[in-house]
Amino acid sequence: MRKLATGLVVVLATIVAVACKDVLAVNNPNNPNVAQVLATATDIEAVFAQGFLQVGFTGSGVHTNNLSPQLNAMSLENYGNVANFDMVYRAAIPRKFIDNSVNNSGSDVHYNDFQNMQKLSRTIANAITALDNFTGAGNTLGSTAQNARARAWGFFELGLALGNTALFYDSAAVVYPKTPTIGPAQPLVGHADVMKAALGDLDSALAIARSVTTNTTAFTSTWINGASTDQATFIRIVRSYQARFRAGVARTPAERAAVDWNQVIADATNGITSDLVVQLSIQAGWQQREVTNAYRYQGWGDVSMMYLGMADTSGAYDAWLATPMINRQPFLLQTPDKRWPSGGDRATQNTASGGANGVPGSTGLYFRNRPAGEDPPGDPWGSSFYDHFRFRYLTVNNSDNAGPWVEFSKAENDLLAAEGYIRKGDIASAATLIDKTRVANGKLPPLSGAVATATDPVPGGNACVPRVPVGPSGPTACGNIMEALKYEYRVETYFTGYGQWFQAERGWGDLIEGTPLEFPVPYQEMQVRLRPYYNLGGVGQPDAATKGTYGF
Amino acid sequence: MRCRSLRRTETGSASRALFISTRETNTMSRARVVAVALGALALLGTGGAVAQAQNAVISGKVTTDFGQPIEGANVYITEMSISVRSDASGSFTINIPAARTDGRQANLRARAFGRAPAVRLINITPGAQTVNFALKEDVNRLAEVVVTGVTAGTEQKNLPFTVAHIDQSEMPVPGATNVLTQLAGKVPGVEIVQASGRPGSAPAVLLRGPKSINGSGRGQDPLYIVDGVILNGGIGVNQLGTALALQGGTLADINPADIESVEVVEGAAAASLYGSRAANGVISITTKSGRNAGSGIHYNVRTEYGGSDIEHTFPYSGYSMLMMDETRTRFCTAGGAQPCAQTVDFGEEARRVNELAGVVALPPVLFRQDFGISSAAKPPLLRNLYEVNAFPITYNPLNQMITSGNFVNSSLDASGNNGGTSYFVSGSSLWQEGAIRSLQGFKRNSVRVNVDQNVGNDWTFGARTYYSRAWQDGGNAEQGTGFFNLTRSPAAVNLLATDNQGRLYVRSNPLNQGSQNYNPLYYFENRRQSDLDDRFLGNLTARYTPTGWLDLDANGSFDRTNSSGLFMFDKGFRTTSVSSDNLGSQTHYAGYGQSFNTSLNGSAHHSWGNLTARYTARYLYEQQDLYSEALGGTTLAVAGLTTAKDATTGFNENSTTQSIRSVGITNGLTADWKSRYFLDALVRRDGSSLFGRDNRWANYGRASAAWRISDEPWWFISPVNDLKFRASYGTAGGRPPFVAQYETYTIGTGGSLSPNTEGNPNLRPETTYETEIGADAEILHRYGLNLTLAHDITKDQILPVPLPASAGFNQVWTNAGTLDNKTIELSLNIPILQRRNLGWSARFNYDRTITMITQLNEAPFLYGTDYQNSGTIFYAQSGYPYAEFYGRKFVKSCAELPGPFEAQCGGPGSAFQKNSDGLIVWVGQGNSLGDGIKKNLWNAVLPGSQAPWGGQLNWGTPIKVRDPVTGSSANMYLGSALPKFRVSHSETFNYKRLFVYGLIDGAFGQYVWNQARAWSFGDFQDREEDQHSKSVEDAKPIGYYWRQGAADAGIGIGGLYDALGVNNVNLEKANYAKIREVNVSYNWGPVRGVGDWTIGVIGRNLKTFTNYTGYDPEVGVTNAGSTSGSGAVNGVDAYQFPNLRTFSLSLSTRF
């Protein structure tokens, strides 16, 4: 028995020794939780410091699995003929509807931006609430101005997240800082209401920023990589986005006509004074992989002549339009616009394009006639001989996602105001703004003094730019001031921002017939909400472009 | 005391037998404990004969009932704790010291695998006596003792649930690199899928079907135990330092030659003992020991040498649609006013673009009519161009990449039993080179020392130690690089061509189909990757038996794997286009995974007349820890270095730490009345750190009963000489991935924080409730039959439920479903012929498992793997089977067309007809399939307004089933990834010294998505696209295989390439039967009086019978990111390394 007792004592003692300790309490040292993320003033501020990065580059820029390739294909800002990321689906003519069925080929793409923007709106809203609680308890991030800076940026980022969602999706949920984090899902509302909330958030951002009257230097931040933003710059940036959003949210020409253009003019006039440029850096998370991929992979990207062909004054574009689309071949574009290489044959234009790796704009050229051996494969009607230096620069010169990325061009800002002036009948003011790039960059004859009405043709005679299709098969004729604006917009905003061509073309009525005007709420979100999915777009279908300006 | 010893041995098991003591020699053996601990060689040298003067010497032979000697039979006297092993002639000798020869009576027992045990009553008296045993066939293995899943060793005939026991003799073909492969086809209900053939890769294992709808981060494999060591998850860090697995385990590092037996606990009822880690079942491995070795030292030496290759080839097209000149040797280039103004030679163009000093191949010229995935053809060509131009020279790139790699496997072991000490020492060396030129495959060296020691009358100790070093080449030699590039290479590509500097071409394919036209051999030859694992397994057991009715034991186990690796492109690495790889990059990764578990066990038993009961209590503590880290960067300063400091930009760092702790407290009670009625009950209280504070503890248990009805006195069906019914109900658990309970934010590049998972501290374990009933019968003393019906219901499925995007978090892990498995298992053993010097037996296994999602408390969802285009291949919905492929469907029968069109479909002259591929196509009323060419109808179009579902149709092309309302491609059920049933058949034949063994197994009813074939349609590389010998009725233009043009607006859907989606053409039925194992050997006996030599030939995966068109229907994606977590579920053939066929010569001896 003594042996037995000894054994049992040993066993029991061991069990008790182990059991007395809560050995099952284990932490996760790899991922922070919300308490850790918002634990200190620095942490709270860091959320706002990262917000613009996440809006602009985590959601839509860090990889190609997002809407941008499709938006570019739908507007023919870029032509991609591969199935990756649904580019070829959107590029196809006649246009197809956006298939939102379960397991559709573009499901990840369609969901990515919606999810990221909606998620970010919640993150920022939570951070604003945390900041309010923090400051409400008498704390500061360093100063009152710093508190205001964080809060203003928070509302700015919240506005961007909702505004970008409203630009491209027909519905979304609106999250406010006081929206409970636990409870029923926020309902889906139409894009107009989402944009209304976004503009309201941007108004809040402006009001908070303007409230800083002392220690304004504390407002300065470097939260946009490569762009130091003081109080005034921040306000200008916000106003430019307001101008973009007010105009861009319109789905149809009628809606765009109904935009509050006075407010757009006011916003743009007080908007950015130079390009809003982000310095891309993989290490810092600032990436624009979509652009570099479009150039890197054959078949993923080509400069389409569908709209840019309007620069041609040789008749080649006319001939191209007159050819059945299926038989169209790339042609040599010859134009007085100095942003294009000059020359009567391809070899000459190759030479005129300079070195293969020119810095965009350094020679005045935006486009390069590439050597024939570098032509990417693809449907000839969608292809051309040309690359844009912007994406070529990012891809070739700086080896992957390093270098300047134009998030918001000054030209876009000015042309938004110019469009407002045209719509308000102030042709002279519009011409002045258009000439900023038309004359300075394109070396084209100025509109100022040459165009008095909205219907006057642009100067240049037979060598006018742009030459606009009279019908879908041509011929072309000199465009008016609005067409000149559109041409400048296309050339100057090429591969900048986030679906810039698409936003504008649907409001101008220039999209090819059947092009979807917006994306449906992705089926994944609909499933979570236990609601049926729906498709949008396609020839003759709702939410699709009708034959418009050019009859395409 | 006699009672205690007797009971202990009769119910003993393989591991229990470790503790059979020879008390009389304990004193002298203690001194040897130290020597054993110091090293095997020292131990080997201590062997010696035990003095025999005045002893009782009991000798004899153990034979079959036909007089054939049985080697390795265990002959023992339980009452005296004496055990010896019979030698090759079946002889045994037991020496009993004179001091113990008191004339008492004792039971001398003999037991051998596959034989019914026998007992003789003897008198322990001085002097010699002879006792022979003739053991009969134990057809149903009723005498086997199992130890896994039971509270004490139990013979099969008394077991109330299924535990399969596979002895070494039933595994005559050792696993090539993994012990699990040698279980394939041997146990019904055990599905072992070698999803990848890459040397060193582990197979996927399912026991009675999957238990989790979502197994990501934890897998569906069973719990693995080796000598009591509960294995940790494979450390398996990847190039970014992310740990690939923690739960589950890996056996890739274990030397199969060390294994004595394997036990498989398939169902939750039997696995309850293992609590919240055991829902997927348990596989327990016992390695060899010296306890039955007899006196002296026994050596075994074995070596196997052979080669590995790949059985099936890729069906390359030897033809193309490229435009050629009139000589048919040169290809026309694109561009220019004239169609063929300039021509190039295919090989010469490849040489031109590669033969330069730089690091990037030149852009090749554009070949005219070079269409493919990246280069669109216009609709007229899509429907008028045929693949009929023969390449002037063809190479078959697969054959160039494949070589017969070496397979060398050698092992040496020594075992002995000396007094109270027994030992087994082994060393092994394995190299499986694989079958890819330039790759080194898998190497493993291992050492094992197993020691058992008796101390005094009450204590026994056991130690198991194992160390291995495994090295694997080519961590990413499949998928993205190797076989994918092959799929894109036309037959004219010469992978072995070299430039004027002797370098392999980097761009061996001059066609213009994207920048991925890589020469995979250049990649393998020049990129550098090595993965190194050092693994140590250790187990210490102490057993204390203070009284006759009580056993106490303590067990401590340790398993640690240190992993490290390097992945790099050296500076100057060549690519097809500008790439950061040219600048060089390095990633160093390292980490460890370790588990420690310790248990305390107590067992007491007592008999009351015909009733014997045993109570068992157990306390178990487990801890698993994992750490991994990675460091790397790009733009190397200097070529040829492997220091991370060489990187100058693009730095990346990462690390992961995880810890999991568990506690289990078990109480079990078994009862046996009249050796006819058996009851078993067990309760386990289980705590795990993977759950929130209030949900850490859960209860599991079982209740089982067996009735040996044939032992009833009234049993009257004499042909059925043995029959047992059994029933069991039990529960076991499944645990979530580590992160599931935690609220997590993701730290992105630059420190950006984004919410990821909403934490759920209320998460509960998945619990599997299993009901198992079965019967084991032996008929006419000849046929063994086992039938088991199992129904397991796994409730509280742990699933990541997506949240509305505006919630901020992506998902929350929630208990949200039920998975249901119904299994039938049947096995039949037939000793066909048993004679002296002649034996012939056969075994058949059949199993069938139907897996259903019976409840889903969230919206139906798509799932799959994280590999390209395979993330949404399955559809989970309540009331439907699990792992069902959903995708697009091409019309294959008239009945699938909408009503009005069905009437126009059928025979000759109908508007819709079936073509040579079995697809219904539109040809127009009154036309025939040949009219596409004869009447030039391939360009004809049926407008959408006149076509099914409103979708325009092109002449002769596949018709896609669409949603009648939306016009979208219908997402339809296509087939199941899980087999409907599986069968295996093995035969063993021996005649005198000749031994022949063969195993064929097969799976039927499952589908595999042949993604490689789908891709090859897009690049026009598949032999199906050859049109050169087809009739006008059968010939099809390139658009048929790729894109149709206007009908689908050139978007890729519609042709068989189908935008690389799952459809009912590229999803193939993957029935197969495979000659899995063959062993033909001949025992030569001693050579010049030395050793006992056996020579043999061994084949593994020798022949696959299938209609599947890929390399091997036994395939699956094993990416860690797959939702199911198992390659046995992910039936995707996406450029994986095909299974290796191995053929080798073996030579062994012993002395």
Image: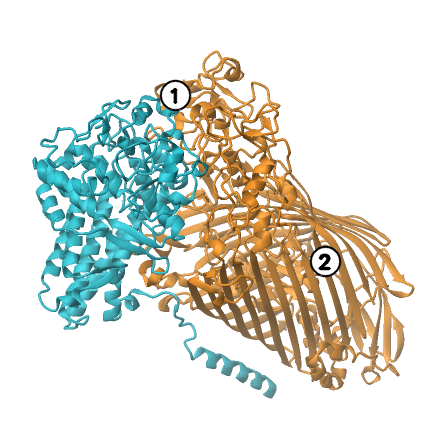
Chain colours: A cyan, B orange
Q: Which dot, 2 or 1, sits closer to the camera?
A: 2
Q: Residues within 10 Å of mark 2 (few under 14, many from 20)?
A: many
Vertical position of residue A496 compared to residue B65: above or below: above
Q: Earlier in the sequence, mark 2 or mark 1?
A: 2
Residue B232, percent from left and from top: 53, 66
- Give the label on residue B947, or none: 1
Instruction: Choose top left, top right, bottom left or bottom right for residue A480.
Output: top left
Q: Looking at the image, which residue is at 27% across and 46% down?
A: A498
Q: Looking at the image, which residue is at 38% across and 43% down?
A: A294
Residue B990, percent from left and from top: 82, 51
Helix, strand or loop under label 1: loop
Vertical position of residue A175 compared to residue B399: above or below: below
- Residue type, mark 2 in image: Val
Nearer-the-camera pick, A345 or B347: A345
Could you tell whether B814 is left or right of B351 in the image? left
Vertical position of residue A26 compared to residue A254: above or below: below
Could you tell whether B19 is left or right of A381 in the image? right
- Give the label on residue B408, or none: 2
Residue A164, percent from left and from top: 23, 47
Q: Quadrant of the C terminus of chain B?
A: bottom right
Nearer-the-camera pick, B752 or A428: A428
Nearer-the-camera pick, B301 or B208: B301
- Residue type, mark 1 in image: Ala
Report the number of numbered marks: 2
